[in-house]
Image (tube, helix red, strand yellow):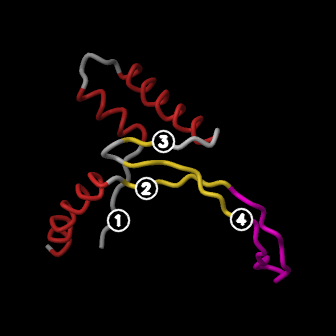
Amino acid sequence: MRPVPAMTRSDLVARLAERFSQLTQRDTEFAVKTILDAMTDALARGHRIEIRGFGSFSINRRPPRMGRNPRSGEQVVIPEKLVPHFKPGKALREAVDARQPAAQDSDAA
């Protein structure tokens, strides 16, 4: 199975600039940066983000736990963490699932 290429931030900017020719590359970069910064800020403040048809972002709490140092075997306390969590919406799940059979067919060839 071949690795799937990732879409990077610059790929997203390039696609938006192509689709909206009235925007310059700089304007498109600024728009993408502004959106991502706003999402980051909202999550950092503990807010939930919901984008209908796409999914929702929230913060999950990982409680403190005991771990082990792999080098020495000594027990260490791993502190509590807050981590971002993404839950895809129904439309996104269905869109991804609809494309899956075609991807499997091309892998077999």
**Label 2 belongs to which residue?**
87
Return the mark for residue 63. 4
**Label 1 belongs to which residue?**
3
Mark positioned earlier in the residue sequence (3 or 4) = 3
Where's residue 69, x and y in %?
A: 79, 76
Q: Are marks 3 and 4 in contact (CB under 8 Å)?
A: no
Looking at the rendering, the stretch of residues picked out in magenta corresponds to 64-81
Q: Are marks 4 and 2 in contact (CB under 8 Å)?
A: no
**Quadrant position of residue 76:** bottom right
Crowding at mark 2 (Cα within 10 Å: few <14, some 14-19, many 20+)? few
Helix, strand or loop for disc 4: loop
Mark positioned earlier in the residue sequence (1 or 4) = 1
Q: Residue at x 36, y 38 (%)?
A: 12
Q: Nearer the viewer, mark 1 or mark 2?
A: 2
Q: Give the alpha-carbon distance from disc 1 to disc 4, as whole Å.
A: 33 Å
Q: Give the alpha-carbon distance from disc 4 to disc 2, as whole Å.
A: 20 Å
Badge 2 amino acid: Lys
Badge 1 amino acid: Pro
Which of the image's four quarters has the N terminus?
bottom left
Where's residue 18, x and y in %?
A: 25, 29
**Label 3 belongs to which residue?**
49
Q: Give the alpha-carbon distance from disc 3 to disc 2, as whole Å.
A: 10 Å
Q: Give the alpha-carbon distance from disc 3 to disc 1, as whole Å.
A: 30 Å
